[in-house]
Amino acid sequence: MDRKLLIAANWKMNPVPDGAFEQDSPYKTHSAVDVYVFPTFLDLPASIESKIITGAQFGRAEETGAFTGDVSMQMIKEAGCIAVLCGHSDRRAFHGESNEDVAAQAIAALEAELHPIVCFGETEEERDSGKAENVIKAQLKPLPTESDIILAYEPIWAISRGDPNKPAATSEDAQEMHAFIRSQLPEDKRESTRILYGGSMKSENAQELLTQPDIDGGLVGGASLKPDDFRKIVETAIKLTTNN
Ligand code: PGA
């Protein structure tokens, strides 16, 4: 496997964790493993200045216009970001983003030369009723998967929403879904596209998840707000990479 692991910190609507912008920050990227950070819009400049690989949590597909409160992909790029989250489940749930909206964002991000990390995943109800694969297929269908995008499979039932005891997907379940997702990609992108796992990844389960053959990193929410936990996740990824 020559896909470089990527550990991404999604801080959501939370303040910057202590020490994150200091010299020995655990959020700095590494030669063996990519580390990206997604702070609030207000914290983007400080993150970029402290030499952290920074992305925005959302970007609008249109370039300019009457879209109060929004920011375009071009603006995010010009601010110094290198990546953007598209279609996080919070955005789908609270801002009504559809699969088509998310695809439009990913296309606009690519045009602005940002790396889109496209998030998707099924709800508990969809999983229990055996619809998970069809839901995922519909989420993937409009995406520009023939381009260099990063995918983040985040089963909604495993996202912590601030609950540190919420269980993640088991590594077997996650691997099974990642393999399915990979099988849906265009043949020439199947091996190179990175598919991150998100949903209660923490220092305790990172190793198990990251050793799965089709899991290429993590999109970490709750644990990314705790610098020591996050450092351990990154160290685990580095160890797995350098031992290989
Ligand atoms: P979590 O969040 O790690 O707290 O489950 C992941 C996400 O929502 O991106």
Image (spheres, helix red, strand yellow):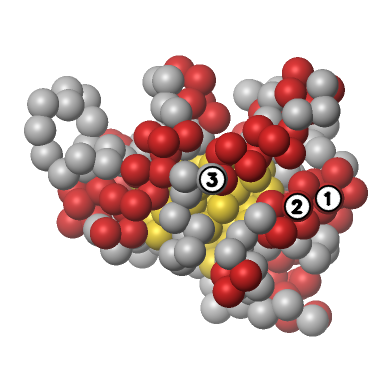
Q: Does 206 sit above or below residue 191?
A: above
Q: Amino acid at mark 2?
A: Phe
Q: Amino acid at mark 1?
A: Glu
Percent position of residue 232, x then y: 71, 56
The kind of secondary structure element at disc 1 is: helix
Q: Which residue is mark 3?
A: 141
Q: Are marks 1 and 2 in contact (CB under 8 Å)?
A: yes
The answer to whether residue 9 shows anywhere in this view is: no
Q: Which residue is mark 2?
A: 180
Q: Does 240 sit above or below residue 124?
A: below
Q: Are marks 3 and 2 in contact (CB under 8 Å)?
A: no
Q: Give the quadrant of residue 62.
A: top left
Percent position of residue 111, x then y: 27, 59
In the figure, is residue 189 to the left or right of 69? right
Residue 176 vs residue 70, the one in the foreground: 176
Q: Residues within 10 Å of mark 3 (few under 14, many from 20)?
A: some
In the figure, is residue 76 to the left or right of 37? left
Q: Residues within 10 Å of mark 1 (few under 14, many from 20)?
A: some
Viewer-nearest of labels 1 and 2? 2
- Distance, label 1 to label 2, CA atoms, is 6 Å
